[in-house]
Structure formats: C-alpha cells, structure tokens
Image: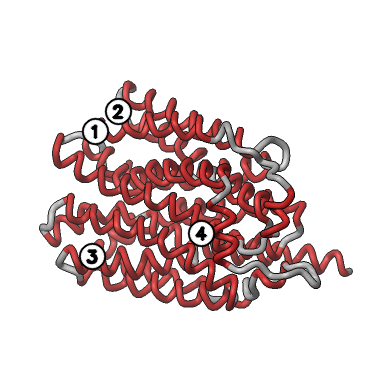
Amino acid sequence: MTETIRRHAVWLVLLAAAGTFALTMGTRQTMGLFLSPLNTSTGLGLGSISLAFAFGQLWWGLTQPFAGAVADKIGTGRVIFIGALLVALGTFITPYMTSTAGLIFAIGVLSAGGAGMAGPSVLMAATTRLVPPEKRGLATGIVNAGGSFGQFLMAPIAGALTVAMGWANSMQVLGLLVLLVLPAVFVLKGNSLQTAPAGARPVGTREAIRTALRTPSYLYLSVGFLVCGFHVAFLATHLPGVIASCGLPVQVAGWALALIGLFNIVGSFAMGWAVGRWRMKSLLSLVYAARGVAVLVFLFAPKTEAVVLIFAAVMGVTFLSTVPPTAGLVAKFFGPANMATLFGIVMLAHQIGGFLGAWMGGKVFEATGSYDWVWYIDIVLAVGAALVHLPIREQLPRPAQAGIA
C-alpha cells in the first residue's frame, strides 16, 4: 500500500508541475500570434513591439535565479502563486497598452516575470526534490512535455478566440486561464532544505553560485543554453512573420506553432527516456546539430504549406528537448540542493539568447525585408553549441559534488 501511495504521489507532483508549465509556457509561446495585431492597433512599428517581446525574454531569464533562490528558502508553492497572478495580470492588461513602455511593462515585466517565477527553474527543482532519483530523468521530460502540450493546446485556442471575439479579448481570456495553475501550489510546496542529508551543513546560495561559476563544464552548459534561447525565442516570436512573408495564410502560422508544441512533447518524452541511457552532453550536441541542419534545409526548400508544417514538426522535436539533459547535468554536477538557483542561472543565459533572438528578428526584418540573415546566424550558433558541449565532464571531482549536494 505504501508503494502505491508513493507512486500516486509522484504522478500528482508531475501533473502539478507539468500543468503549471503548460499554462504559463502555452500562454507565452502564443504571444507571437498577437504581434501583428498589436502593431496594427498601436502603430508603434515591428521593431518597437519586438523590443517589448525581447525584454520579456530577458526578464523571464533574469527572474529565474532570484525566484529559484527564494523558492529554495521559503518554498516553491508561494513563488508559483505570485507568479501565476502576475502572468494573468500582465496578459490581461496588455491590450490597454498603447506605448512601447506600456508594452514592456505588461509583456516584459509582469507576464514574463510571473512566468519566470512559475517557470522551469522552480518547477524542475521541485520535481527533482519530490521524485525518487531513478525517476528524475523521465520526470523532467514529462514536466518539459507539459510546456509543449500547453503550446500545442493554446495556439489553436488563441487563434479561434481571436476569430470569434477579436485579438484583445482573446488575449485577456488566455490571461485568465493561467489562474488554473493555482491548485498546484499545494502539491509543490516545500523547499530544498528538505533534501539535505541529516546532520549535513547546508550550503548557502552564494557559496553554491561561486562553486558553480568556477566549474568549466557548468559554464559550457550555460553557453550552449544561450544558443538554445536565441533559437527558441526567434521561432516563438517571428515564425508567424516568417510564414506571412512566404505568402501563406495566417492559419498556417497557428498550426505551425501548434505542431512545434505537439512534436516537442515527443522530443521531451524521448529525451527524458534517453538521459538515463546515454551521456547527456552527447544528446545535447546531437540536438543542436540537428537544428542547424534543419534550418539549412528549410532555407533552400520551397516554402509551401507542407514544407512549413514539416519544418515546424522537426523544430518541435528539438525545441525544448534540451531542457531535461541540461537540468539533469546541473543536478548531476551539484545535487538537488540549490538546484532552483543554479538551474535558474543557466536559464538566465538561455533568456539572454532569447532577448537577442526576439529583438534581432524584428530589427533584421525592418532593415532587410527578410529573415534570412537571422537564419544564417542561427545555423552558425547551432554548430557552435554542438561543439561547446563536447568538453563537458559529466562526472565532476568528488569535492565539487560534495560541496553542493
């Protein structure tokens, strides 16, 4: 009976974490559908609106180390509660913003900051803390798949709501849907102090960060994740624009975003299974190399609806499948204590790349009338990310591990 209860508790944790990620990520990843209506409504220009989206990418990352540190101290549930309220508020008031500063505040500060507080660093750390070690790889894959399912579900919903009630009301409904994550607060409560062995000296946040920043493998991992952020943010923000520039119907953009979410579920589950069987650094190199090849093929392929949707599916498999092995390596390096903080720093690197991807997409298109140069940069970065993971040492010296675990 005890084993049955424990198994049910694990699935409840995974449902809470994956459901939270589904609603916060699903809402954020559909925002690209509103870029054109915002531009038409405000007349601010694509570059200015892209700046608000780009700032959101950066702020989402900046929030996560601090949210992780707070969650490590006062508990995950409280942090998720505040984060969900901020996402709902920011998304709801966005249609009322008519200036660049207003959009930065609503999209970039409130919504993105709230999503960071209820984001992967906090959720992955809670999952790592609450599930048995032998199930952590698959568990992080399931949580990551939750974010993908949210995108798959929310993109068509956002499109349908926009047709039925207009873009502004559609965005506000999405904001209210985020509040469905609030019951997860009670399931994911607790903090990292519960993972410390009996009698062990707790390691402070500053000491944990200093140790991590002196670890070359951790720095290589962060550089690779920066490239992931560039790629993901560019696609999430500008793929609808890429599709529109190919002369394809707007519905294709909605389905392309949905396919990215759907196939990322496949990629997340597959990666969650694979991290327990192969070296995580090798899996990451493979994912980044696959992205570069896929983008190169897409550039030279005819831009038909079928090609775009196939490209979206391929991108979906690799979209966030980098998260389970990246989170797994952080846990393998340093253990579950301070996990939210240390993975949050890696997520910050991801979102610095995200800022560049979202912002450059708009600026390059304004300057050249095409997204081609962003794709070229993306290919070069993907190759670099594939290479930078090769020198990572998955088994760190015991003193480094013992100092944090």
Res 344 label: 4
Task: Describe the element under mark 2 as helix, strand or loop.
Answer: loop
Colour setting: secondary structure
Question: Is 402 rendered above or below residue 170?
Answer: above
Task: Describe the element under mark 3 as helix, strand or loop.
Answer: helix
Labels 3, 1: front one: 3
Question: Is 6 rendered above or below residue 266?
Answer: below
Label 4 near label 3: C-beta < 8 Å? no
Gap in angstroms between the C-alphas marked 3 and 4: 25 Å
Label 2 near label 1: C-beta < 8 Å? yes
Location of residue 331 in the rendering, given as x and y in whole percent from the top left corner: 65, 53
Question: Is 288 rendered above or below residue 225?
Answer: above
Q: Amino acid at mark 4?
A: Gly
Q: Amino acid at mark 2?
A: Lys
Gap in angstroms between the C-alphas marked 2 and 4: 38 Å
Res 103 label: 3
- Graded by Cα atoms within 10 Å as few (under 14), some (14 to 19) or many (20 or more), the crowding at tag 3 reads many
Q: Which residue is found at the position 49% from the left and 29% from the top?
A: 289
Gap in angstroms between the C-alphas marked 3 and 1: 28 Å
Location of residue 213 in the rendering, given as x and y in whole percent from the top left corner: 53, 52
Q: Which residue is found at the position 59% from the left and 51% from the top?
A: 327
Q: Nearer the viewer, residue 227 or 141?
A: 227
- Graded by Cα atoms within 10 Å as few (under 14), some (14 to 19) or many (20 or more), the crowding at tag 2 reads some
Location of residue 215 in the rendering, given as x and y in whole percent from the top left corner: 58, 47
- For marks 1 and 2 on the same chain, the one whose residue lies earlier in the sequence: 1
Quarter of image, res 26: bottom left
- For marks 3 and 1 on the same chain, the one whose residue lies earlier in the sequence: 3
Q: Which residue is mark 1?
A: 246
Can residue 336 be seen here? Answer: yes
